[in-house]
Image: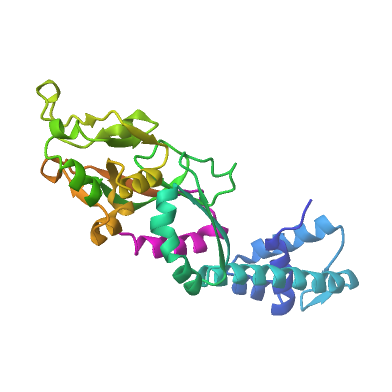
Amino acid sequence: MKTTTEELLAFVTVIDSGSITAAAEALQQTVSGVSRALTRLERKLDATLVRRTTRRLQLTDEGELFLARARVILAAMEDAEESIARQRERPAGRLRVDAASPFVLHCIVPHVQAFAAAYPEIVLELSSNERIVDLMEQRVDIAIRIGALQDSTLHARSLGSSRLRILASPAYLAERGEPRTVAQLRRHRLIGFTAPESLNDWPLIDDDSENRDAGARFRIVPEIAASSGETMRQLALAGGGVVCLAAYMTSADVASGRLQTVMDPVLLDVRQPISAVFYQSASMAGRAKAFLDFIAARLVL
């Protein structure tokens, strides 16, 4: 039977305090509880560690040998606990973060240098996947997911939500004209996703008499399709057509004039939730919280 920490601590405290009664007071336990712990320890070791008399306690030879080892063990455990506490105060270690490439490029990469300066002891590893990854299988600590979360055993933290907007480059609009209604938009070159089809439902009030259901989306038929939102953004920047993308990856383009929003009067206020998902882990909690707090404060959604 293995010795417990409680038994080691009871033994060492009894010796240091000089009596079982004093040890019980120091440990905030009952006298009988400390006495039982000491008895269990001796039974497990099959050795007498302390000779008890009515006046004093005396270590046996076995007790002196075991006391030295017990002190080393308890000191190592205390040091380990302090190391974890220090890590929570000053996070350190490897942190693996996965997200779709647009989020990595627009919301993480611009802040990596500042994060490294703030937390020099965290080793950040970034990976990009357009589809949902298995955190355990891919050895990922945090995954950033865009859209509604499915039922999961994972813990989640909301990072906010980002509005969908319809955009095109000024050069494209100068050539083809600015669409103002869904009927006009149909005649434009539309850029959409290869899959899933639901991503090609644009949040527009459809003025087509056959599609006037309240809240109904306008499903486009893409003339150009891509699997990544970042590819679609690059196509739009190059004048390839009209695209529907989230603000988190296009705000800088709009602010600089590289892209222009269109269809605003008939655009529904639809926002994509952005969440961080992770397994709860005490050893990872400090660096994960540091990273998520840092990024969340800098998100432009």
Q: Is residue 54 above or below residue 198?
A: below
Q: Nearer the viewer, residue 107 or 255?
A: 255
Residue at horizontal 52%, vertical 72%? 90
Is 280 situated left or right of 259 in this image? Answer: right
Q: Is residue 47 above or below residue 185?
A: below
Q: Quadrant of residue 11?
A: bottom right
Q: Where is residue 209 in the image (x, y as percent from the top left)?
A: 9, 23
Q: In which quarter of the image is residue 216?
A: top left
Q: Position of residue 72 (x, y in %)?
A: 76, 72
Q: Can residue 110 be seen in this view?
A: yes
Residue at horizontal 19%, vertical 31%? 187
Point out the image quarter for the C terminus. bottom left
Residue at horizontal 40%, vertical 50%? 102
Q: Is residue 60 above or below residue 193?
A: below
Q: Does the magenta stretch include residue 299?
A: yes
Is 202 situated left or right of 71 in this image? Answer: left
Q: Is residue 243 magenta?
A: no
Q: Start and end of the magenta stretch? A: 276-301
Q: Is residue 165 visible?
A: no
Q: Spot the residue most to the front.
A: 175
Q: Where is residue 167 in the image (x, y as percent from the top left)?
A: 24, 46
Q: Where is residue 247 in the image (x, y as percent from the top left)?
A: 28, 51
Residue at horizontal 90%, vertical 73%? 61
Is 49 situated left or right of 157 in this image? Answer: right
Q: In which quarter of the image is residue 289?
A: bottom left
Q: In this view, does 216 lie above or below 300?
A: above
Q: Spot the residue most to the top.
A: 210
